[in-house]
Image (cartoon, grey):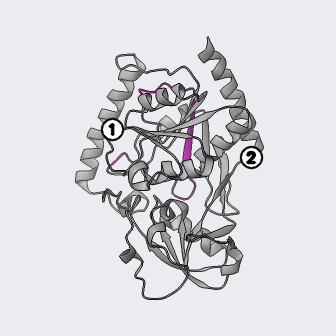
Amino acid sequence: MSRRTMPQPPAYWFGDGPVPAWARALAGVYSALVAVRSRLYRIGVLRRHRVGVPVVVVGNITAGGTGKTPLTIALVERLRAAGFKPGVASRGYGRSGEAQARWVDAATPPADGGDEPVLIARHTGTRVRVDRDRVAAAKALVAAGCDVVICDDGLQHYRLQRDVEIEVIDGARRYGNARMMPAGPLREPVARAAACDFRVVNLPEPDSAAEFGEWPMRLQADDALPLRGGRPKPLSAFAGQRVHAVAGIGNPGRFFTMLRNEGLGVVPHAFADHHDYRAEDFAFGSELPVLMTEKDAVKCAAFANAWFYSVPVTAKLPEAFWIALLEKLGSSANVVAK
């Protein structure tokens, strides 16, 4: 499997530390390039491509994880319940042979399909296509019979014409220091968010709330699933116990906080996003239960022992969000049909 991982962001992205001069200088260059690219698409010099069915893009304007994958899974399930045949297009970051497009299903090794696409396929059973070229991926899904395409992490992939844009925001980190990369976490200016049809905020605490114009999303975890098979164990069964908590995601602290809120004594182990796990990574020196995110668990089954558990989460959003989304999607479908 590819050893490439995404390092954790520098402290000044989401803190009050000083931004190095070199980072500020490069951020100016990056900002100019982003602005030029956006304008070229806006005036039609660079072409956008329609694929013949509505396209829903899920993404963020910051680097790192915000909760896009649980939302993508929820979208597939709700759209299918509404009578659609959804498919998911993804790049499949970190997979071997990234230049090669491929279909991903529940049996695909994460090394070949990418951890997030494999997780989506296992949860939903829907068609999943990984390809650097999202337009090609979307066309392949349409050819396979999908009547709506969900593009996972595709907000900046402007070549693919989209009908609905959903921005996902980390409710704890927000936009950090609001600077462009590499001086800050922004892929695009904050003003870009205003153009999205829906702004979903992944709330960090049970008592936290969304801001005006945002839709609240909570990631609910109820059970821990043994990686070697067996009956689910409620998280409450671990309350008052110390556990090793493993997270190789964009914001590992969110997972640790979630477990602490359930009353668990967390010994945190943060890895880089898309980390390629090996058995030696779990030589923690004490035999405590090991709880990890689903995204991490799909890469650990081969060497898991009876102490390894996956903690799945489910995205919960207001019913009004789904009503508004389906109304928007229905209008988009009419436009595409014409």
State whether residue 189 appears in this view: yes
Give the quadrant of residue 110: bottom left
**Position in image of residue 129 (x %, y %):** 47, 38
Q: Residue at x 75, y 35 (%)?
A: 323
State whether residue 214 appears in this view: no
Q: Residue at x 37, y 45 (%)?
A: 180
Give the quarter of the figure containing the N terminus: bottom left
**Position in image of residue 191 (x %, y %):** 49, 36
Give the quadrant of residue 326: top right
Kindly identify which residue carries mark 1. Answer: 31
Judge depth for marks 2 and 1 and give the one in front: 2
Q: Are marks 2 and 1 in contact (CB under 8 Å)?
A: no
Q: Secondary structure at mark 1?
A: helix
Q: Is residue 317 left or right of residue 113?
A: right
Q: Is residue 101 left or right of residue 105?
A: left
The amino acid beneath tag 1 is Ser
Q: Nearer the viewer, residue 118 or 181?
A: 118
In the image, residue 325 sits, relative to residue 313, either above or below, namely: above
Q: In the image as oriented, which residue stretches furthest toward the top?
A: 338
Disc 2 and disc 1: Cα gap in Å?
35 Å
The amino acid beneath tag 2 is Pro
Give the quadrant of residue 77: top right
For the record, the magenta segment spans 159-182
Q: In the image as oriented, which residue stretches furthest toward the bottom?
A: 286
Examine the structure image and report whether residue 177 is included in the region drawn in magenta. yes
Kindly identify which residue carries mark 2. Answer: 318
Q: Residue at x 46, y 60 (%)?
A: 249
Q: Please tell me which of labels 2 and 1 falls first in the chain.
A: 1
Examine the structure image and report whether residue 202 is included in the region drawn in magenta. no
